[in-house]
Image (tube, rainbow, N blue to C red):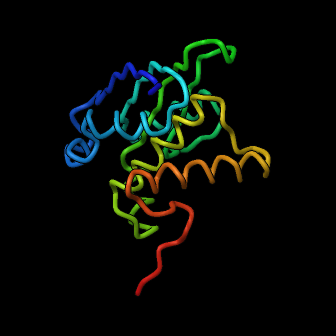
Amino acid sequence: MTPRLTLSMQFPTAKTYPSHKAIVSRATVARWIKASLFADAELIVRFVDEEEGRTLNRTYRQKDYATNVLTFAYAESEDDLVSGDLILCCPVIEREANEQGKPLEAHYAHLIVHGTLHAQGYDHEVESEAQEMESIETDIMQSLGFSDPYVPVTDA
């Protein structure tokens, strides 16, 4: 049975990168998330600017910089519905995609898959967990038609 998804998307400010909105349509984001779900879920995906991303990272992780994706997972047990907020920082994601030579769409897909796995309890703090999570991410990304996000892009 395919997990059900209740999805809310938020673009809170006018300066939230209109060109990115075309890449991350509701239908596209829902498809990426559904490919990453192992249980029913209620998720909010919020696209933010660097100021909001930095404030959230500083407030909740005590790291004073904007990061690409933050996941706030709310399920307290395995029996709870998967619920959470995925916060994606548009300028950081764009900068990383450019630096890594990756299409912006592929980088968004990877970070949404990554955040969705975090919302389901996956983590990468320990090497064995990181390897498991990266393997799952790679499989999901390839099922979505993207390349392995952990293989560096090289110039041909």
Instruction: In the displayed orientation, state which residue is furthest to the bottom.
Output: 156
Question: What is the x, y in percent for residue 107?
Answer: 42, 54
Q: Quadrant of residue 90?
A: top left
The residue lying toward the viewer, choosing from 128 and 13, is 128
Point 45% across, 59% down: residue: 96
Residue 144 lies, with reference to residue 83, above or below; the image says below
Q: Quadrant of residue 64?
A: top right
Point 59% across, 27% down: residue: 59
What quarter of the picture does the C terminus occupy?
bottom left
Question: What is the x, y in percent for residue 86?
Answer: 47, 31
The residue lying toward the viewer, choosing from 98 and 139, is 139
Q: Quadrant of residue 76?
A: top right
Point 61% across, 27% down: residue: 60
Count of numbered labels shown in the rendering: 0
Point 32% across, 26% down: residue: 9
On screen, residue 16 versus residue 109, left or right, reads left
The residue lying toward the viewer, choosing from 129 and 23, is 129
Instruction: In the displayed orientation, state which residue is furthest to the front.
Output: 1
Residue 97 lies, with reference to residue 154, above or below; the image says above
On screen, residue 15 versus residue 49, left or right, reads left
Question: What is the x, y in percent for residue 62?
Answer: 66, 34
The residue lying toward the viewer, choosing from 111 and 134, is 134
Question: What is the x, y in percent for residue 154?
Answer: 47, 80
